[in-house]
Amino acid sequence: MEKYLLCIAGAAVDMFYRSELYPSEGDFTHVKSLGNKIGGCPVNVSAVCAKKGAEAKLLDMLGTDDDTTPFMMSEIQRLGINTDYIYQEKGVINGKCLIVNTNDQRTMFIVDPIRPYYVVDKRLQDALNNATYIYSLMHMINRSFETIEPLLEAKKHGAKIILDGSSKYDDPKRLQTLYKLADGMFINETDYARLQEATGSDPRKVIFNNGGLFVCVTHGSKGSTLYLKDEEIYLPSVSGLQVIDSTGAGDSFAGCFIACLIKGFDYRTALRYATLNGAYACTVFGSTGGVCTFDQLDAFAKEHHYGDKL
């Protein structure tokens, strides 16, 4: 049986700019364009996973009359992502991310996509059912499906659902429902606290009580902690990096972790490679900086003496 990751929604164009004085310039800030790249968490995760040799499919909806669609489709295909489930419809507005870099600071302005819910026919339900892993942001699921029934059906067929918890928490009641879907979650420590406050529940306890497998909390330059039901694994980050652009580092971490699981690696090995991949992404410009092979990560680990004492 084919093993693959299905990422739900969220392709965007990352538009990079450089500003010398933002935000001190006030209402009129001058910026210089650094160019555009394909982005969006699900795209980044899919691309990282595909580069590791795991099949990655993207479920998305793009606008036929949006001038960024041809660029996005071309880039998604170039990254080796399966586009069989990318629908193109009139009236859809694609997502965009405006990224302003000022010295070592970065400000991101998210332009949300506008589109209807997916029509879940037999073809799409089969894609969900047969996935090894399904990945999405929590609010993307809310925007993609009118109900969570298609995902509950996929879980019955063995699909494991992994959520990015660094999301919008605009409906606490729906969040409790999404908790029940999660077999795994990636989230940074700041958003973990926000999520706990929004729902009044400890995310780890809720996920494990509902049969979840893992929660991975990232701590930026301090490393990450993987929580399993009966075990806790902490790994430090890679030291001595020359950071060029941290955009997409979290996605690179998640995509590599999922690729490792698809390849049959154990959790500790998956966490180690994911940590390396997140760090590697910071040394390359653009949100897809973490698109690299396992061999490149092994060389990167050797170069930075990562793992010598782990």
Image (cartoon, rainbow, N blue to C red):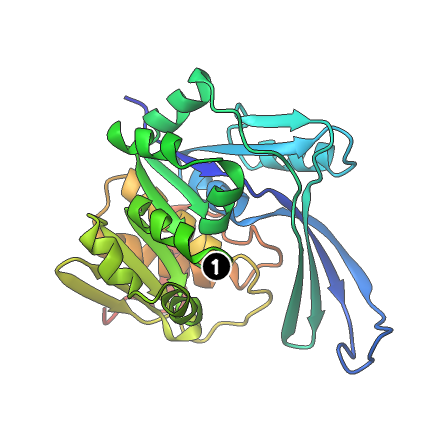
Q: Is residue 288 left or right of residue 51?
A: right
Q: Amino acid at mark 1?
A: Tyr
Report the residue that reaches farthest toward the left.
Answer: 230
Q: Is residue 308 left or right of residue 106?
A: left
Q: Is residue 101 left or right of residue 272?
A: right
Q: Is residue 223 left or right of residue 283?
A: left
On screen, residue 208 above or below 134: below
On screen, residue 109 above or below 254: below
Q: Which residue is mark 1?
A: 169
SS assignment at label 1: loop
Q: Position of residue 167 (x, y in %)?
A: 49, 57
Residue at screen point 45% across, 22% down: 124
Residue 115 visible in this rendered orientation of the protein = yes
Q: Compare residues 43 and 304 and report the one nearer the observer.
A: 43
Q: Quadrant of residue 269?
A: bottom left
Count of residue discs: 1
Residue at screen point 29% across, 58% down: 215
- Quarter of the image that includes the C terminus: bottom left
Q: Position of residue 285 (x, y in %)?
A: 62, 59
Residue 295 visible in this rendered orientation of the protein = no
What is the crowding at mark 1: few (fewer than 14 residues within 10 Å), some, or many (at least 20)?
some
Q: Position of residue 56 (x, y in %)?
A: 44, 34
- Quarter of the image that includes the N terminus: top left
Report the residue that reaches farthest toward the bottom.
Answer: 24
Q: Position of residue 305 (x, y in %)?
A: 34, 69
